[in-house]
Image: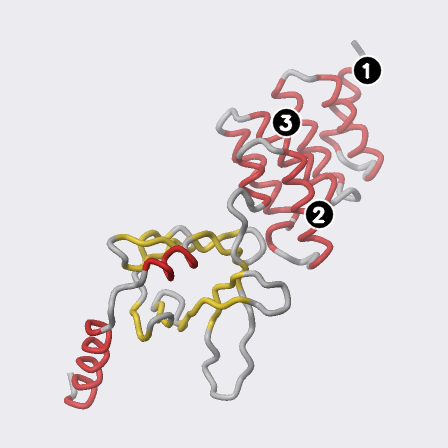
Amino acid sequence: MKPKFLYLFLFIISINCTKPTNSDAFIKNVTGRYLYDSDQVIEVYFKDKVLLLTWKGIKDIKPMKFDDDIFFVKEMNEKITFKTNPQDQKEYLVLLPKEKGTEITFNFKKLEENELTPSEYLANDNYEEALAGYIAIQQKDSLNIAVNENEMNSLGYYHLGRNETQKAINVLKINAVLHPNSDNVFDSLGEAYFKSGDTLQAIVNYKKALAIDSGNRRAKNVIERFDKK
């Protein structure tokens, strides 16, 4: 390591080591879950008064402390802090601008204690709350990956493969609401209902798929097979 980089490294480490531990008031104020990317969260918590994060499935991320409320998260390559947004009086996890003079953006709002993301509502079989959440995401950004038709369809089949038929049905029902002009979502929903033993709803959804696309062979074959009975 070249001397100037070694000195810089040691300087940063020394700064980090000399910073006091986080205060009880700070810990109480910032501990919680912050909404990230519309359907994911950043969890902020503390162990022995040391700030830790869980982000994108990575647990116990330990940011480097620069100041009382400023930290560097190498996994994000970002400096973060925590601020109250004067417009809504909510707490936010904020990414500090990389350039001087740039206005601060309030990036990730702290969720209420019992507030969940749409995918979390879905995981808890709370269909109505999940549906409302996904509709809100789609209305705000129709191209958001959280409401992508193929992604949701894949999630539905993931649950089918694990014999979690009700979870699969809930996912595919939401996909059908979000993408009502796709024969594929109703075809998939029909398959999920068949696997659950609900033949009536299976046929209903296969007929919806066929009404959208008369060339849907699977839907046509299933309907014809049951019409002959």
According to the picture, the residue beneath numbered tag 3 turns out to be 192
Q: Nearer the viewer, mark 3 or mark 1?
A: 3
Three-letter amino acid code of the residue under disc 1: Asp
Image location (x, y in percent) of residue 97:
48, 79
Residue occupying the point 63% across, 27% down: 192
Q: Nearer the viewer, mark 2 or mark 1?
A: 2
Residue occupying the point 75% across, 43% down: 182
Asked which secondary structure carries label 1, the reply is helix
Using a 10 Å C-alpha cutoff, classify the residue at mark 3 as few (fewer than 14 neighbours), some (14 to 19) or many (20 or more): many
Seen in the image, is 116 located left or right of residue 139?
left
Three-letter amino acid code of the residue under disc 2: Ile
Image location (x, y in percent) of residue 201:
74, 22
Q: Is residue 208 above or below residue 109?
A: above
Label 3, label 1: how far apart the Cα atoms are? 20 Å
Using a 10 Å C-alpha cutoff, classify the residue at mark 1 as few (fewer than 14 neighbours), some (14 to 19) or many (20 or more): few
Disc on the earlier residue, 3 or 1: 3
According to the picture, the residue beneath numbered tag 2 turns out to be 135
Asked which secondary structure carries label 3, the reply is helix
- Colouring scheme, one of rainbow, by chain, secondary structure, one colour: secondary structure
Disc on the earlier residue, 2 or 1: 2
Disc on the earlier residue, 2 or 3: 2
Label 2, label 1: how far apart the Cα atoms are? 35 Å
Label 2, label 3: how far apart the Cα atoms are? 22 Å
Q: Is residue 224 above or below residue 135?
A: above
Q: Nearer the viewer, residue 16 or 225?
A: 16
Q: Quadrant of residue 77?
A: bottom left
According to the picture, the residue beneath numbered tag 1 turns out to be 227
Q: Is residue 219 above or below residue 10?
A: above
